[in-house]
Image (spheres, grey):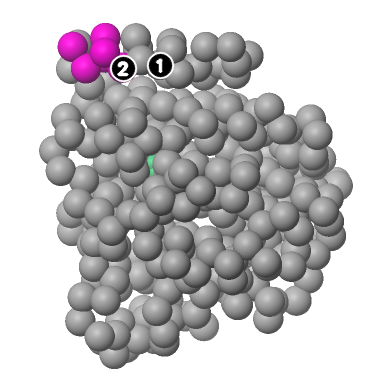
Amino acid sequence: MEEQNFKQQFQEMAQNLPKGIFHRLPLKKLQGVPVMNIIADHFENIATFQARPDDLLVATYPKAGTTWVQEIVDMIDKEGDAEKCQRAPTFVRFPFIDIWPPPPLIPGVVDAEKMPSPRILKTHFPFHLVPKSFWEQNCKVIYVARNAKDNAVSYYHFDVMNQTQPEPGTWEEYLIKFMEGNVGWGSWYDHVKRYWEKKDQHRILYLFYEDMKENPEQEIRKVMEFMEKDLPDHVISKIVQQTSFSAMKENPMANYTTVPKVFLDHSLSSFMRKGEVGDWKNHFTVAQNEVFEEDYKKKMAGTSLRFRTEI
Ligand code: PPS
């Protein structure tokens, strides 16, 4: 289906939704983690999702590079055939299993159930909320982590444009909420640490946004090996090009522009905003940085996990 058809189809669906049903949903605690109320209220249905052994789960804290890795995985799976990867927008190609929206929208797990194998699925759940069947089935998981400062900046801009997320407030207010873990899907610190601790007990490939930026080919090769694929050099070069920020920003099937304005308002900020390492320097004041660093040391004490905030 063409871009315009998707746009039209989603637009019609959005127009038929009861007004405001999806607007700035409040967060609700789920096993200690703040999540959108529509997740907490339906978690029983999500937690019992049946994973299949050949599922590949892309797991991330929001705004860590999910869409980027999804595109890489799809391009590897389709052996560099960009046309096949443009069959549908990101959120149709890869069901987002966390969300249980009100009808007529379809929950991610319901979409996934109908999908033939092998499936590529998305989650932002912290490790302990991922449906147990993924671990029982020994599924492969690709986890992407991004340094906390850039992650917070990206999440702030996203919450400005994402009309389903709580109002972010000012950057100053938002940064405090981020440090307290009082944002959707909870604490960045707990999220990245827990997957890091668990990565050797499960089939988890732990990637860093900063490494992907610095050396995309090297990281794409890691993903390819993890997927047990062997592609020739010219195909890998094509994947590097096709999954670059500039290519994905222009790709309507990867840049979320097919999503109606009632959900994502691109006039406030783009989904494909900057795609850089170190943009935090344009947002953090010196004082904010000092407080952040002090708090970071405490929250990250005792882990061997290290991030780069510049490359
Ligand atoms: S989401 O909503 O959680 O799925 O968002 P997610 O895809 O995890 O994160 C969006 C941020 O990733 C950037 N991005 C990229 N950076 C570099 N290269 C590529 N190809 C790429 N694709 C997406 C996107 O621009 C968001 O980051 P910011 O810093 O806001 O620009």
SS class, disc 2: helix
Percent x, y for residue 160?
22, 50
Residue toward you, 231 or 224? 224
Percent x, y for residue 263?
29, 67
Asked if the residue under mark 1 is in contact with the one under mark 2, i.e. CB atoms within 8 Å, the reply is: yes
Q: Is residue 64 left or right of residue 290?
A: right
10 Å neighbourhood of mark 1: few (<14), some, or many (≥20)? some
Residue under label 1, please give it: 296
Image point (29%, 90%), residue name: 16
**From which residue to which does the magenta span run?**
287-292
Q: Amino acid at mark 1?
A: Tyr
The answer to which quarter of the image holds residue 37 is bottom left
Number of numbered callouts drawn = 2
Q: Is residue 243 left or right of residue 280?
A: right
Q: Is residue 284 left or right of residue 89?
A: left
Q: Amino acid at mark 2?
A: Phe
Image point (65%, 28%), residue name: 196
The secondary structure making up most of the magenta span is helix
Residue 200 sits inside the magenta stretch: no
Residue toward you, 69 or 121? 121
- Mark 2 to mark 1 CA distance (whole Å): 6 Å
Q: Which mark is residue 292?
A: 2
Where is ligand 1, by quadrant? top left
172 relative to 95, above or below: above
Residue toward you, 126 or 60? 126
